[in-house]
Image: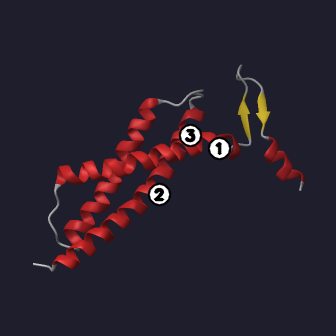
């Protein structure tokens, strides 16, 4: 049996690695959601994409947590507790990331379709970069 101090350090390290994995997964899934919405020409955010993204991030974070807990530090894993803890870590990060990406999504595009879908509106920042 490990000492109490080592077990706490193992848990802290596991949560730090899990937090990094969550941050990377949230960015990647939100970027893919943005591209899928553009591909399907959705004007508003689609709820099923958000649900799938949260589930994907939850699976990734749980996999990281389980690998570090079981295989590296050889501790017991409480399945339900860790799923809830990971979910409560993911939801605020995902919400903030989504708000930031929605606020700045036009900056990432060179153009966007107009309301009728036929005319392209070119991003002025993209034109300014080309003039330099």
Q: Is residue 115 left or right of residue 45?
A: right
In the rendered image, the vertical position of residue 108 relative to residue 76, given as above or below: above
Q: CA distance from mark 3 to mark 2?
A: 16 Å
Name the one closer to the observer, 84 or 114.
84
What residue appears at the point 24 percent right and 72 percent down from the top-left corner? 8
Q: Position of residue 55 (x, y in %)?
A: 35, 43
* In-image side of 76 versus 90 (left or right): left
Please state which of residues 32 and 89 is positioned toward the viewer in this rendering. Answer: 89
Badge 3 local density, few (<14 within 10 Å), some, or many (20+)? some
Q: Which mark is residue 24?
A: 2
Residue topped by disc 1: 104
Q: Residue furthest right?
A: 131
Q: Is label 2 or label 1 in front? A: 1
Dot 3 or dot 2: first in sequence order is 2
| Residue 105 location (% of width, % of height) | 64, 41
The quadrant holding residue 74 is bottom left
Q: CA distance from mark 2 to mark 1?
A: 18 Å
């Amino acid at each position: 049996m490990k000492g109490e101090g080592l077990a706490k350090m193992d848990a802290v390290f596991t949560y730090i690695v899990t937090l990094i994995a969550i941050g990377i997964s949230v960015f990647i899934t939100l970027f893919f959601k943005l591209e899928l919405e553009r591909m399907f020409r959705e004007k508003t955010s689609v709820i099923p994409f958000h649900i799938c993204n949260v589930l994907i991030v939850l699976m990734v974070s749980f996999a990281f947590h389980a690998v570090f807990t079981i295989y590296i530090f050889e501790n017991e894993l409480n399945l339900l507790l860790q799923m809830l803890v990971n979910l409560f870590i993911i939801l605020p990060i995902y919400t903030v990331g989504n708000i930031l990406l929605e606020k700045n999504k036009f900056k990432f595009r060179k153009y966007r379709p107009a309301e009728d879908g036929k005319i392209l509106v070119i991003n002025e920042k993209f034109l300014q970069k080309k003039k330099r």
